[in-house]
Image (cartoon, rainbow, N blue to C red):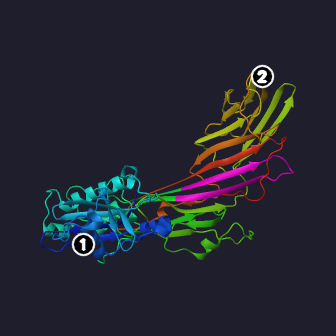
């Protein structure tokens, strides 16, 4: 639910009503304009809105108790959502309003379904959420005593702009609205120059400073074990940050480094909060032919972080080899299927896994009968119902960095196993699942000593990196596997 506009009105009998506070949310109004199309009705000026609302609520012109547009028997009011009639046939609906004494609060929620014919209010979640927001706002303005005084109203209204950035960023109220009770004064920056809090930052952090930076690289591969088909693989990485640093616009710089033999980072995309970049970082592209002069860092990213965790940047890297090279062969032998697998961990990859598994599914066959299969390392789990072998390689390859699986399988079950239109005959694959902590294929890392935070308090710095797999396939070299042409799409 989002709000197009919000008003706080002060009204006492014998005095002119005044709009003490109003806020329009341009991003929500833009969405309303797109959704409504030709039936869009703009939010009027405060002066016009105030007159229309007071008329609709019967608070204006007490000498005229009857107003045709409001009191005619053909008009059916649907409190608490009122309809304000503008010029011609244009109407503003649903305007939500609640009052207590001289205080009148109103808002215009965004309705994301057609407003004609008028839907039942019970079907509009934005109405109930809007009323809840107004009730919380009313509690905040009235204070803990529940009574209104002019001085208290002025002080609390003055606190609303920074408070709304926290509880209603960009016009969308948060699930938990800390409006009730006595408010605490908004935190001011410690510098002598007052900084304006940007609209995209919903609040200010208070507490012990810390910065957490994590690099995650993902490798994908299609290996065929056939000279007529070229193996393909690609690597892409993401750098995510969570910065808990005090200040309106704190400055943080994260630097990515590569070892002397590391693979340069390419196709780098950065978060909008990054304030400046070396042009060499943005121009590095995997489309260009490698000429040995690619920029290899260091990659510096100065930024002013949002409160929530975010992706600082993403990149690709052209590594020379995949982490695990595999060979997979299937052969039909009478009523058996001969299976032979060899996996070799490349010497450049750290031999310490969080997990490493090889899944061997068999499609378009009867259910698995006898599986006489041996492995040189790890444990083998046979799921006959799913026609699946799960080879858990554990946390380390043996010293030779090579493991094998060999055996025979019969499919003598009475019922059919799972099917796949792609994997017919001897067309089959192994899918690898792996995660290696504290390593990346490109060599990219974040040195915690190169994370700079310009803050009065010394922050705690946490850095991590890991390698994981996704869509890592090794196809049977004697079958007809699908061929991936060119670089795999990210």
Residue 412 got which mark? Answer: 2
Q: CA distance from mark 1 to mark 2?
A: 81 Å
Query: In this image, 333 relative to 361: left or right?
Result: right
Q: What secondary structure is marked by label 2? A: loop
Query: In this image, 371 relative to 244: left or right?
Result: right
Residue 19 got which mark? Answer: 1
Residue 94 at x, y = what percent? 35, 61
Query: In this image, 359 relative to 191: left or right?
Result: right
Residue 439 got which mark? Answer: none
Of residues 401 and 205, the one nearer the viewer is: 205
- Residue lying at the far front of the rendered structure: 73
Residue 358 at x, y = what percent? 68, 38
Of residues 158 and 203, the one nearer the viewer is: 158
Residue 365 in which image quadrant:
top right
Residue 49 at x, y = what percent? 30, 72
Mark 2, other Cα within 10 Å: few <14 / some 14–19 / many ≥20? some
- Residue lying at the far bottom of the rendered structure: 193
Looking at the image, is mark 1 or mark 2 earlier in the sequence? 1
* Residue stretch rendered in magenta on the structure: 215-239
Mark 1, other Cα within 10 Å: few <14 / some 14–19 / many ≥20? some
Residue 28 seen in render: yes
Which residue is at a point 30% across and 69% down the rendered structure image? 161
């Amino acid at each position: 639910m989002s709000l197009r506009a919000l008003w706080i009105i002060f009204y006492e009998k014998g005095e002119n009503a005044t709009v003490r506070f109003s806020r329009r949310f341009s991003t929500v109004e833009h969405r309303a304009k797109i959704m409504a199309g030709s039936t869009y009705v703009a939010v009027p000026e405060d002066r016009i809105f105030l007159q229309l609302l007071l008329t609709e609520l019967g608070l204006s012109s007490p000498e005229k108790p009857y107003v045709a547009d409001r009191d005619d028997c053909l008009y059916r009011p649907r409190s608490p959502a009122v309809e304000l009639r503008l010029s011609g046939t244009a109407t503003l609906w649903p305007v939500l309003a609640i009052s207590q004494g001289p205080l009148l609060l109103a808002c215009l929620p965004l309705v994301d379904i057609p407003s004609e014919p008028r839907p039942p209010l019970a079907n509009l979640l934005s109405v109930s959420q809007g009323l809840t927001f107004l009730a919380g706002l009313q509690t905040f303005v009235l204070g803990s005593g529940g009574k209104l005084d002019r001085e208290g109203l002025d002080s609390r209204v003055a606190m609303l702009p920074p408070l709304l950035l926290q509880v209603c960023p960009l016009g969308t109220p948060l699930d938990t609205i800390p409006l009730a009770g006595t408010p605490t004064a908004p935190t001011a920056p410690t510098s002598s120059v007052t900084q304006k809090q940007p609209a995209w930052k919903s609040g200010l952090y208070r507490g012990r400073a810390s910065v957490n930076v994590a690099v995650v690289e993902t490798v994908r591969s299609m290996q065929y074990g056939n000279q007529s088909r070229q193996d393909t693989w690609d690597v892409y990485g993401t750098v995510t940050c969570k910065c808990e640093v005090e200040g309106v616009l704190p400055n943080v710089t994260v630097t990515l480094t590569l070892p002397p033999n590391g693979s340069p980072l390419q196709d780098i995309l950065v978060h909008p909060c990054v304030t400046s970049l070396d042009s060499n970082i943005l121009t590095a592209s995997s489309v260009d032919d490698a000429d040995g002069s690619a920029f290899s860092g260091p990659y510096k990213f100065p930024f002013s972080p949002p409160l929530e965790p975010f992706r600082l940047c993403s990149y690709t890297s052209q590594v020379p080899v995949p982490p695990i090279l595999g060979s997979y062969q299937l052969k039909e032998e009478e009523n058996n299927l001969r299976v032979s697998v060899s996996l070799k961990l490349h010497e450049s990859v750290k031999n310490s896994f969080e997990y490493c598994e090889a899944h061997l599914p068999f499609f378009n066959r009867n259910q698995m009968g006898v599986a006489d299969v041996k492995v040189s390392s790890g444990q083998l789990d046979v799921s006959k119902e799913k026609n699946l072998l799960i080879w858990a390689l554990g946390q380390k390859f043996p010293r030779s960095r090579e493991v094998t699986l060999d055996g025979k399988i019969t499919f003598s079950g009475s019922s059919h196993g799972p099917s796949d239109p792609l994997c017919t005959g001897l067309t089959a694959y192994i899918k690898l699942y792996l995660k290696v902590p504290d390593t990346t294929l490109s060599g990219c890392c974040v040195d915690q000593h190169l994370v700079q935070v310009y803050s009065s308090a010394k922050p705690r710095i946490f850095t991590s990196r890991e390698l994981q797999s996704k869509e890592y396939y090794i196809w049977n070299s004697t079958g007809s596997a699908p061929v991936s042409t060119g670089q795999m799409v990210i």
